[in-house]
Image: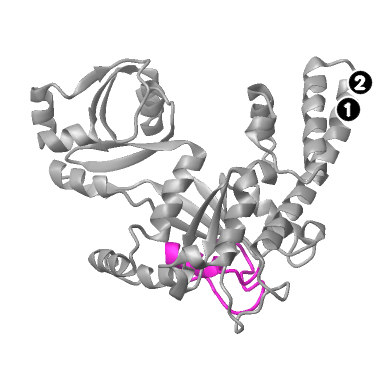
């Protein structure tokens, strides 16, 4: 899973990126300090893995990972080359989802590119640049497809219909949403890798003092009210606090979060909502050699899940020995789980569930 972190300059993007990846990207009080997109790979927090690692006495513990891409601050006119322009819009095309960081704090010492803080205006600025960039792509694609459609090719005619529909939506300053298309049309839209079709999670970045009392923050309210129309999700964090959390040991983190009245870190929330946005779940394999997490799309059947481990597993799939994580913990071991009858033998039509602990049987 690749997530792109976007937003206007000086909203806290690079500070957040540093905190969640510990990659040490340059974060400074001036626009465009991120000259190249910083990339950091983060292990997905999952407390279940440590438990299974100890239960199986595994040699290795391998979590699944997310790649975060910190993209330079976009400004009005970015789609036409303003600021650092199109170069960075192209990086967003490569990600699976977008984390849009919105500044929801006042600080006279940190300049705002528009002169004042305004979540609604800031979001509209970014979204318009994504729309303009996509319109350029769609107009070129329409021109190319029209030539093919003139020959009478049905596929080209069908594609042209969807392309013109996309253009109409973008010209009305709307983002592309699944509900605006049929399933077949949406599959085609996804193949175009358009910026405005990517699932987006909004992150309201507040000051350290406000994290425990966000209900009184009018900027957060403005953000939440505005994105209601998008049916999008929003989480509230303090990038500065996340930076402090990143310096702590695991046990210290829990104490620090409790002191602040927080249940989860920003990273945990972004991962959790990111999985939900993309419809992802985790299954686990565990044994003496290793305990490993695997990410799949919700609705994946057992043979295809096995194929994530190795293509031979899918080709020669026989069955899957499945124990839910909760049942396994209650049993205390895989051997005991089998004795209690909570380990199930599942066939080719079994749809995997989050937290399934699996042993695949196959024959090459």
Quadrant of residue 246 in the image? bottom left
Q: Are marks 2 and 1 in contact (CB under 8 Å)?
A: yes
Q: Residue 56 appears at what percent x and percent y? A: 15, 41
* Mark 2 lies on residue: 150
Residue 37, magenta (yes or no): yes
96 sits to left or right of 55: right
Q: Quadrant of the C terminus?
A: top left
Residue 29 against residue 206 in the figure, above or below: below
* Mark 1 lies on residue: 146
Residue 358, magenta (yes or no): no
Front residue of this view, candidates 95 and 298: 298
Residue 216 against residue 65 in the figure, above or below: below
Q: Residue 121 appears at what percent x and percent y? A: 71, 61
Q: Mark 2: give few (<14), some (14-19) or many (20+) Cα within 10 Å.
A: few
Residue appearing at x 76%, y 53% in the figure: 128
Mark 2 secondary-structure assignment: loop
Q: Mark 1: give few (<14), some (14-19) or many (20+) Cα within 10 Å.
A: some
Region of the chain picked out in magenta, as a range: 9-38
């Amino acid at each position: 899973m690749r997530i792109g972190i976007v937003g206007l300059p000086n909203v806290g993007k690079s500070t957040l990126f540093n905190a969640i990846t510990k990659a040490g990207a340059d974060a400074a009080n001036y626009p465009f300090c991120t000259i190249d997109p910083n990339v950091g790979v983060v292990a997905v927090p999952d407390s279940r893995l440590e438990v299974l690692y100890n239960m199986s006495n595994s040699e290795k513990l391998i979590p699944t990972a997310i790649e975060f891409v910190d993209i330079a601050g976009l400004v009005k006119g970015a789609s036409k080359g303003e600021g650092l322009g199109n170069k960075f819009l192209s990086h967003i095309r490569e990600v699976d989802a977008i984390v849009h960081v919105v500044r929801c704090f006042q600080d006279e010492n940190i300049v705002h590119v528009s002169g004042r803080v305004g979540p609604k205006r800031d979001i509209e600025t970014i979204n318009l640049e994504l729309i303009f960039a996509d319109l350029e792509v769609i107009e070129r694609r329409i021109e190319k497809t029209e030539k093919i459609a003139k020959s009478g090719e049905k596929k080209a005619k069908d594609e042209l219909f969807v392309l013109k529909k996309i253009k109409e939506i973008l010209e009305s300053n709307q983002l592309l949403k699944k509900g605006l298309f049929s399933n077949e049309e949406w599959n085609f839209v996804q193949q175009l890798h358009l910026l405005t079709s990517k699932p987006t999670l909004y992150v309201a970045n507040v000051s350290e003092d406000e994290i425990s009392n966000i209900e009184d923050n009018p900027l957060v309210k403005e953000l939440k009210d505005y994105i209601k129309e998008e049916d999008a999700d929003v989480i509230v964090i303090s990038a500065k606090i996340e930076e402090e959390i990143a310096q702590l040991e695991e046990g210290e983190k829990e104490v620090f979060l409790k002191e602040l009245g927080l249940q989860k870190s920003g990273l945990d929330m972004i991962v959790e909502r990111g999985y939900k946005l993309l419809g992802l779940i985790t299954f686990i394999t565990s044994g003496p050699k290793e305990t490993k997490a695997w990410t799949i799309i919700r609705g994946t059947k057992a043979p295809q899940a096995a194929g994530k481990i190795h293509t031979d597993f899918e080709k020669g799939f026989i069955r899957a020995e499945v124990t839910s994580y909760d049942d396994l913990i209650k049993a205390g071991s895989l051997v005991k789980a089998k004795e209690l009858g909570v380990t199930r033998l599942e066939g080719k039509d079994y749809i995997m569930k989050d937290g399934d602990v699996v042993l695949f049987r196959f024959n090459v």
